[in-house]
Image (tube, helix red, strand yellow):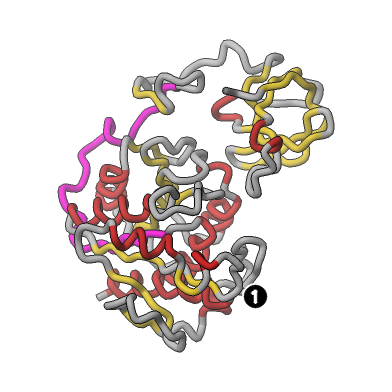
């Protein structure tokens, strides 16, 4: 059940596109103004405290549930009637891209890069480069609000992402789509050269082969295959992860590959020995990945580029492979 408490906004720390960071009675809290309305100092609010009470690694803050001062009687989006988060207390009508024009019937070989972790997104987009139009599709498996991601905001500011799409249960993107397949078809119809799919921040994980959010990458790869795209899976590689299941090539990567129904390319950075079970792979030269990723947010489980160089190099390799395919 929900863990809710009443409080007062005691500080407004930051206002960003689609996101505000505040304090409620001194405790950090995230606000999604497009969902719950604007927030100001002194507002009486109700917040969801469960993630913080559980001490979740990526959920060390409360989330504003309703603003009792200025969040009631908000107008719905004009012309919207398809629900996001339907039949929950958070259901709200949003205009979906499928309602506004035809979708591409085929992806026509457009590369679709499939990430199993949100921290792979920045190096992937650096590998693609700013000369190509990139659509980012957020799939289920982790955080649902696109606006939570500071990485997406940074990539858009740097010209490395053109459009952010909230697919399926994900919310609060530049564009909303009913599912991953239609998100891919919309992105190609809108003229994007590469599509990058990823779960949001804070992946769901249970330590089991099937109970984790990384399988969202397989869903995206299968949709790309069915629509004649060119799916590329990002290998999750780690030398510093203390958990055996994530050391070397993560079991998340292996599970996602097992659930890919069509051919999917696996990008692999040259210079790193790969496990014998992982084949075939497309080897990619990655010598310039550090310069390409300069000033981008690079962090994997609290470790940076110097501690986990192959993690980021492997993600960069997938973006570079997508660039090669898009330009051929």
Taking the image as drawn, is residue 94 in sight?
yes
Q: Residue 286 appears at what percent x and percent y? A: 46, 82
Taking the image as drawn, is residue 312 in sight?
no
* Label 1 packing within 10 angstroms: few (<14), some (14-19), many (20+): some
Q: Residue 242 in magenta?
A: no
Residue at figure coordinates x 72%, y 21% from the top left: 5
Circle 1: element type: loop
Using the image, determine if residue 284 lies above or below residue 240: below
> For this view, does 228 lie left or right of residue 179?
left
Residue at figure coordinates x 34%, y 38% from the top left: 177
> For this view, does 16 lie left or right of residue 44?
left
Of 208 and 63, which appears nearest the observer? 208
For the N terminus, the image quarter is: top right
Of 119 and 18, which appears nearest the observer? 119
Using the image, determine if residue 327 lies above or below residue 169: below
Of 138 and 210, which appears nearest the observer? 210
Tell me which segment is drawn in magenta.
Answer: 92-115
């Amino acid at each position: 059940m929900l863990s809710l408490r009443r409080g007062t906004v005691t500080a407004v720390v930051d206002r960003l596109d689609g996101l505000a960071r505040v304090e409620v009675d001194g405790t950090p809290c995230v606000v999604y103004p497009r969902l719950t309305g604007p927030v100001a100092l002194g507002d009486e609010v109700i917040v969801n405290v469960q993630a913080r009470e559980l001490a979740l690694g990526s959920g060390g803050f409360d989330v504003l549930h309703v603003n009792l001062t200025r969040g009631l009687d908000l107008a719905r989006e004009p012309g919207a009637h398809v629900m996001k988060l339907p039949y929950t207390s958070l259901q709200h009508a949003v205009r979906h891209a499928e309602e506004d024009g035809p979708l591409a019937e085929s992806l026509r070989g457009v590369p679709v890069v499939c990430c199993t972790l949100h921290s792979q997104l920045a190096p992937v987009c650096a590998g693609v480069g700013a000369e190509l139009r990139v659509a980012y599709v957020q799939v289920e498996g982790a955080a649902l609000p696109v606006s939570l991601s500071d990485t997406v905001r940074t990539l858009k500011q740097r010209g490395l992402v053109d459009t952010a799409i909230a697919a399926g249960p994900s919310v609060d993107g530049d564009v909303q789509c009913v599912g991953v397949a239609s998100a891919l078809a919309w992105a190609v119809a809108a003229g994007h050269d590469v599509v990058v799919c990823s779960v949001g921040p804070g992946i769901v994980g249970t330590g089991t082969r099937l109970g984790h959010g990384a399988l969202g990458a397989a869903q995206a790869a299968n949709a790309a295959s069915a629509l004649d795209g060119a799916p590329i899976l990002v290998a999750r590689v780690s030398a510093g992860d203390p958990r055996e299941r994530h050391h070397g090539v993560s079991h998340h990567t292996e599970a996602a590959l097992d659930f890919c129904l069509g051919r999917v390319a696996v990008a692999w950075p040259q210079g790193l020995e790969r496990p014998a079970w992982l084949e075939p792979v497309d080897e990619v030269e990655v010598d310039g990945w550090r310069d390409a990723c300069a000033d981008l947010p690079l962090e994997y489980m609290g470790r940076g580029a110097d501690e986990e160089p192959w993690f980021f190099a492997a993600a960069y390799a997938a973006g570079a492979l997508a660039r090669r395919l898009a330009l051929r």
